[in-house]
Image (cartoon, coloured by chain):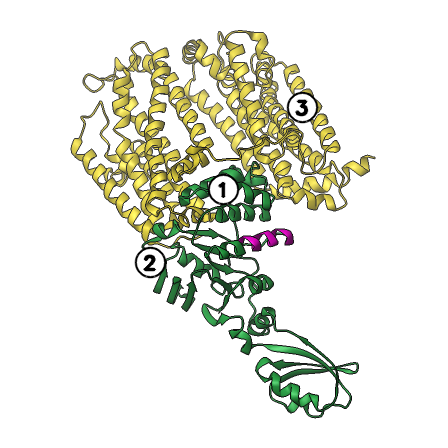
Chain colours: A yellow, B green
Amino acid sequence: MSRHLYHNTGLLSRFILRRDRVRIPVWLLAISLITVITSSAFTDLYSSDQDRQAIAETMKNPAMTAMIGPGYGLDNYTSGAMMAHQMLLFTAIAVAIMSILLVTRHTRADEEDGRIELIRSLPTGRLSNLSATILVLFAVNILLIILVGLGLYALGIESMDLEGSMIYGAALGATGMFFATVTALFAQLSENSKGTIGYSFTVLIIAYLIRAIGDVGNETLSWFSPLGWVLGSEVYVNNYWWPILLTVGASMIIAALSLYLNAIRDLESGFLPSRQGRKHASAFLQSPLGLALRLQRTGIIAWAIGMFLMGASYGSILGDLESFYKEIEMIMTPVEGFSLTEQFLTMLMSIMAMICTVPVLMFILKLRGEEKKNRTEHLLSRAVSRTRLLGSYFIIAMVGGFVMMLLSIIGLWSAGKAVMDEAISFGSMFNSAMVYLPAIWMMIAVAVWLIGFVPKLTGLAWLYLGYSFFVVYLGGVLQFPEWMSKFSPFGHIPKIPVEDMDYMKVAMLTLLFIVVTVVGFIGYKKRDIDG
Amino acid sequence: MTVLKIENLTKRFGKVMALDGVNIEVEKGEVYGFIGPNGAGKSTTIRVLLGILKATDGDVKIFGMDAWKDAVEIHKRIAYVPGDVNLWPNLTGGEVIDLFVKLRGGNNINKREELIRKFNLDPSKKCRTYSKGNRQKVALVAAFSSDADLYILDEPTSGLDPLMEMVFQECVMEAKREGKSIILSSHILSEVEKLCDKVGIIRQGKIIETGTLSELRHLTRTSLVVETKQPIPSLSEQLGVYEIEMKGTALTFQVDTEKMDTIISYISQFGVTRLESTPFTLEDLFMRFYGGEEQTSNAGVGGAS
């Protein structure tokens, strides 16, 4: 019987490892290196007990608890306690994402593309592929436990002993195993890979939210979330093993369930009914703009939430910064009339503007992706002009740029308001952020120009953004010559409110944006569409 | 009335000459069959017609307007079905059909429902789940439910089953009855033979033959199977006779259609007891033009890109 079901599982496991011989090591190294590096950075930054205790004080608010989990050992905030408090949850989420993506890739995605059919036509068992995937994922997570555990222990930090470090690693690995099996389960339930990923991420988000609500209000509630379990191990403070074992045990049960479901279902079917779609297009969809919005709907919403959260997370540290800067302002005198926090904000605005440019570029370059997939020809072979088509994507990018900036400063302002003694007014933040719009526009113009003239090289827009980030963000730290930042539109924006508004510069940049955009549109009208 | 006129169309991709002096003319109410091997330039020609590619040289007029400059105006009156239909995985077939019909301008709800029923398509499914044939059906329903004057069909039946091919042929004939013009690029020669009034054969970017099927007859041969009382001497010496083979007591050979009369009178001297002739097919024509020399191995549709 078992031979019948599991034949060649070992061979398939090796095959999975072969296919992911780059992917898996990259995930493992990235997660363990970031963990180890952050830990050693924490120790350098907050070397004395007083430093750490000061931070611990700022952590005692519901906003922080909701975001990163309950602080164990806040009264004796050792390096270990701090690491577990501030890093464990987010790293665990990263591990969960790794597991979700890897499992989907080897289960439902392969099945959907008909590759499992090929495998199943060979002498392999009915459950071999799923069990091989689960085996590989368990092995990967166990390897992660060892890498992280030994890596943290090897730093030789006093409060981070071997047992604590291993539990830290185990907390990550157990989360990975749990979400690997959850994804394996949804790969049986859902009929397609998008659904599998979607449902698994939904579980992850709900787990995070339940834990957040539970940690702030009702501790029992947190125990309904697997993320609550792993945090409940109280790493480096009490070092409980049983929550880890609970998580692994739950994974085993889910794995068994998914294997059972796999055994009783037909290939390429699912248990969740695939939702019936609309038979007719809504009035909204029936235009190039509506289509472009609809195609990017999920991306737009995800980025909007992401930008708000990014603003909020920067905002949540403004309180610490304020108290930190207050201390050093005794020694260092800030620019006349402005606090150091405000000066820091101008730096922050340029970074946020550049991060907001990422979705904006994605929105406009989507057109090129559509062209490559031969789908713009559906529109252009109908009564749609090229200007109207490019214009639709252009509008989304332009409006998107404004909305992304707006959401990030709403996040920044509302979180900042909650944690700062002297909150900065929304108007002031709005102005210093929105002055970056012409720079974002300029990036759009560059993308439009590339689409119009060298569509094969639209990737250069990303390179240009990368360059901007490099010279504007790191340029100050690394003391690059001034002219280097002048090649980036972000280097020309006045740092309001510390600097005065430079209408001339901003107007010139806007003018340049208009010219380059118009030229790009003309180029798009004149060239061949390829696909 | 000429609906479509291509004169001396040249298209170059860098150094590659994709089209080299193509001439095509399609009249109102005419079905023009466009055949040729993969990579010969069928799709490239069609994409120039659609204003998606810009002609390097030559004149392309549809409804008397320039295919490149007046693309939008022209597209209000044409319907296009590509050979390889890529759709958006997260939209349903019904949504895509509505979008396509709307973008063209017209709207014909009754026809849409009728075609969906005829083609047996489930419009509530996401395009991700459609097979190649079903994606093709989406494009066909969208095209035939539009009230176009010119239909441009680029290998529209690749992926359809024989039943659906019949439905497609009905759609084409109906459009023809309504006086619409159709340009049909296809590999299915029986389909072209059945539907088309005129045929153009393209090879390596050049139209090598064009005309009605009967006009092309002079290019073809007829296969004959003959049994005679007496042996036929020196058949191989007759002009226009090829591939003579003895099969049992029967003799099989091919005759240039033009030379048919002479050959029949010649063999009748020897007491014909059996005579079978296989009529000329487009397939023979096609094979004669492409068979043997330089077959492109480029499989699938849409070779030019």
Q: Position of residue A409 (x, y in %)?
A: 33, 22
Going by the numbered disc 2, the residue's amino acid type is Asp
Q: Is residue A417 above or below residue A94?
A: above
Q: CA–CA distance between discs 1 and 2?
A: 27 Å
Label 3 close to label 1 by CB (< 8 Å)? no
Q: Nearer the viewer, residue A110 or A222?
A: A110
Q: Position of residue A48 (x, y in %)?
A: 43, 14
| Image point (58%, 74%), residue name | B288
Is circle 1 on the same chain as circle 2?
A: yes
- Kindly state the secondary structure of the residue where label 2 is placed: strand
Going by the numbered disc 3, the residue's amino acid type is Ser
Highlighted range, magenta: B162-171
Circle 1 sits on which residue?
B97
Circle 3 sits on which residue?
A251
Q: Is residue A147 left or right of residue B208?
A: right
Let me know if residue B14 appears in the view. Answer: no
- Kindly state the secondary structure of the residue where label 1 is placed: helix
In terms of sequence position, does the residue under pointer 1 or pointer 2 come before the other?
Answer: 2
Q: Is residue B73 left or right of residue A95?
A: left
Label 1 close to label 2 by CB (< 8 Å)? no
The N terminus of chain B lies in quadrant? bottom left
Chain letter for mark 1, please.
B
Going by the numbered disc 1, the residue's amino acid type is Ile
Quarter of the view holding residue B115: top right
Circle 2 sits on which residue?
B66
Chain letter for mark 2, please.
B
Q: Position of residue B190 (x, y in %)?
A: 60, 63
Let me know if residue A492 appears in the view. Answer: yes
**Residue A393, magenta (yes or no):** no
